[in-house]
Amino acid sequence: MKPTSSLAEALREAKIVEALSVARFALGTHDRLLHIREGQQIEMDFRYEIHKIDEALQLLGIDPARPPSAPLPQHDDSVGGDSVGDDTRNSRSSSQSMTSQQRQR
């Protein structure tokens, strides 16, 4: 049975929303973090990028003000190469994540 075009479109939009949400979560996690480069302390500022993602989510009918749930790494090998958990950079322990969140404050 072939999915109808409206179902295929809904699935496509769901993948776009998921990708934007994951990107927004990552940028929001690192926004305003201090970074030391060549002896200079620089604050990472992703407000513009987060604003653009919020605009795109609004175009898709998603309220970006709604509290997002944190993306969870997926370790299912049958998913393919595009899941969040395929990248080892996303497999940080919760204690490391807490430390980076504490640095934001």
Image: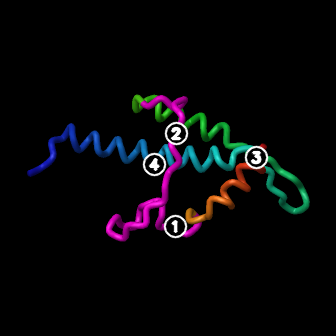
Tell me the SS state at disc 3: helix
The dot on residue 97 is none
Q: Is residue 31 above or below residue 55?
A: below
Give the mark toward the camera: 3 or 4. Answer: 3
The dot on residue 19 is 4
Give the mark toward the camera: 2 or 4. Answer: 2
Tell me the SS state at disc 1: loop
Question: At 45% across and 48% down in the image, what residue appears?
Answer: 19
Whichever of labels 2 and 4 marks the residue nearer the N terminus, that label is 4
Colouring style:
rainbow
Whichever of labels 1 and 4 marks the residue nearer the N terminus, that label is 4
Based on the displayed image, in which of its 4 quarters is residue 14 positioned?
Answer: top left
**What span is colored magenta in the figure?**
62-89
Task: Name which residue type carries label 2.
Answer: Pro
Callout 4: 10 Å neighbours few (<14), some, many (20+)?
A: few
Whichever of labels 2 and 3 marks the residue nearer the N terminus, that label is 2
Q: Which residue is mark 2?
A: 68
Question: At 51% across and 31% down in the image, what residue appears?
Answer: 66
Whichever of labels 3 and 4 marks the residue nearer the N terminus, that label is 4
| Alpha carbon separation for disc pair 1 and 4 | 15 Å
Callout 3: 10 Å neighbours few (<14), some, many (20+)?
A: few
